[in-house]
Amino acid sequence: MINVPRGTQDLLPGETEKWQYVEEKFKALCHTYNYHEIRTPIFEHTELFQRGVGDTTDIVQKEMYTFTDRGERSLTLRPEGTASVVRSFVQHKLFGHPTQPTKLFYIGPMFRYERPQQGRMRQFVQFGVEALGSADPAIDAEVIGLAMNLYRSLGLKSLKLVINSLGDVESRNNHRHALVEHFKPHIHEFCSDCQIRLEKNPLRILDCKKDKDHPAMQTAPSILDYLNDESQAYFAQVKSYLDHMGIDYVVDKNLVRGLDYYNHTAFEIMSDADGFGAITTLSGGGRYNGLVEDLGGPETPGIGFALSVERLLMALDAEKIDLPIDQALDGYVVAMGDNAVKKAVEIVYNLRQAGIQVDKDYQGKKFKAQFKAADRLKAKFVIVLGEDELAKQVVSVKDMTTGDQQEIPIASIATEMKQLIQGGKA
Ligand code: HAM
């Protein structure tokens, strides 16, 4: 037997309906916020993520599914969506469009070679948005608001929004310098990755899982102490908008995020529901004002966030929220007798053409067993066709909720069934 690869999963009927439900919610919300869908390839040139996500990040160093294709090109299954969206924004010169900012959303699988556990998959699906072309703190608040809105509209309550500012280039450079000075005397006590990070990207040290309990971590200089006036004012404005929107948050000066492109606003949304499990981050995002330029476009600010559907559904489970998914079938045609069984094929075809969701038996089941099947499928109406009905050119329709039964002519079955389903009188 061949099973799915480690860290991946099959989604079977029963589960897929939940995915469709949250997808529709997300799409509708994006529509409300005026974000438009973008679809980019599943694989990209490896260089995109090396430059975009950053050479020193865990994602690029350890987690990418990279392969050489038959034309000797190095390609990578996308580990996230932002780099691809920005690549596409630059490639198609979307910055030249009259309507700015460019507000995009995406839904799709991402791939990271991580150690799988609950909520950490090697293939997972992200919902994400990216707003490119505005450095207005109001759009930071908009993106955070959209994320919170999605969770709330699905009924989640135990949410914690954590925000931080990583400052602009000047603030980051000053902070970087302070970090190097701080960690240098202890760096031999840190892991080999951190020793490299000290040179290349000291901020990453703060994100190290191996050294997280080293005392020097607790006393590390905080970016918030190094924000210049402009960065402070920016952060204050974002917070003020969130306050006005009634969105609660906590500031966590240690929130640095695992990708290199961030500056100014960084945020994560966690679940603090009981029984959620070890990994509590539901989504993350932030501002990336240099990324468009890094990927060959004009100077363009950007901000976005992404969540994974896997963790969203885990959060719903943890809060015992059942999505209102209608599993019931509109109608089930029960037929008895050779001629009626044949006629049933035509009847379901006509009903379906009229947009009515119906099914019938395909296993030669007896009358009673067909009724059972209708019951199992939660059919709202059972449409009975026996030899008697056929002779009269009618079907006998039973409303399974009320038990009411009536005959309707086969000739007008689609119109009358529609009325019945919509709750009208036949
Ligand atoms: P990220 O924090 O790497 O950011 O991922 C965002 C979200 O994807 C996480 O909060 C988590 O819900 C989910 N996620 C990440 N890895 C896994 C995994 N292995 N299994 C299940 N879920 C996972 C980004 O990807 C950025 N591109 C977000 C962004 C958009 N920033 C700006 N724009």
Image: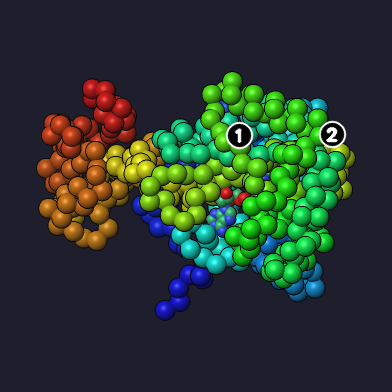
Residue 238 placement (x, y as % from top left): 67, 28
| Gap in angstroms between the C-alphas marked 1 and 2 | 26 Å
The residue at 24%/38% (across/down) is 380
Which label belongs to residue 169? none
Q: Is residue 92 above or below residue 134?
A: below
> Is residue 215 among what the camera can see?
yes
The residue at 51%/70% (across/down) is 6
Residue 13 placement (x, y as % from top left): 38, 54
Q: Is residue 115 above or below residue 38?
A: below
The residue nearer to you, when weighing 125 against 182, is 182
In the rendered structure, the answer to whether residue 206 lies left or right of residue 295 reads: left
Q: Name the residue under label 2.
A: 96
Amino acid carrying mark 1 in the image: Ile
The residue at 77%/37% (across/down) is 227
Residue 377 placement (x, y as % from top left): 26, 48
> Is residue 37 among what the camera can see?
no
Which label belongs to residue 144? 1
* Disc nearer the start of the sequence (1/2): 2
The residue nearer to you, when weighing 183 against 171, is 183
